[in-house]
Amino acid sequence: MPAQVRVSGEQTGGAFSLTENLARRGSGSPVHIHEHEEESLIVLDGELRVVLGDDEHLAGPGTADLAT
């Protein structure tokens, strides 16, 4: 399932956007860098490998992360 935009940057004057992503095991986003924006996430179900700089951890249900 592709990402669904719930609130667009246009709707918020560029302040933020909100997307919902559903990924099967092993098919999440590759490791990437945001040069000009922050990224926050909340894991609802399953596990997500999160890499923040040199730190890496598994995020389970209820975990919230903020990458700045």
Image (cartoon, grey):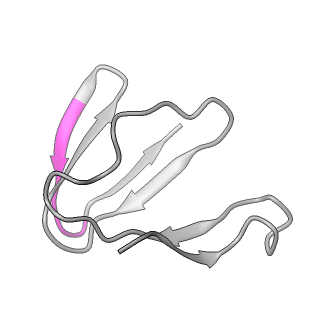
Q: Is residue 57 magenta?
A: yes
Asked whether 1 or 9 is in front, the reply is 1
Q: Position of residue 48 (x, y in %)?
A: 21, 53
Q: Residue furthest bottom?
A: 6
Number of labels in the image equals: 0
Q: Quadrant of the C terminus?
A: top right
- Quadrant in the picture for residue 46: bottom left
Asked whether 13 or 3 is in front, the reply is 3
- Quadrant in the picture for residue 12: bottom right
Asked whether 46 or 29 is in front, the reply is 29
Q: Position of residue 31 (x, y in %)?
A: 35, 34
Q: Residue at x 56, y 34 (%)?
A: 34
- Quadrant in the picture for residue 24: bottom left
Q: Is residue 18 above or below residue 54?
A: below
Q: Residue at x 70, y 71 (%)?
A: 8
Q: Residue at x 86, y 65 (%)?
A: 13
Q: Is residue 6 above or below residue 10?
A: below
Q: Quadrant of the N terminus?
A: bottom left
54 to the left or right of 4:
left
Q: Residue at x 81, y 59 (%)?
A: 14
Which segment is the magenta one? 56-62
Q: Residue furthest top?
A: 54
Asked whether 53 or 33 is in front, the reply is 33
Q: Position of residue 37 (x, y in %)?
A: 64, 41
Q: Is residue 10 magenta?
A: no
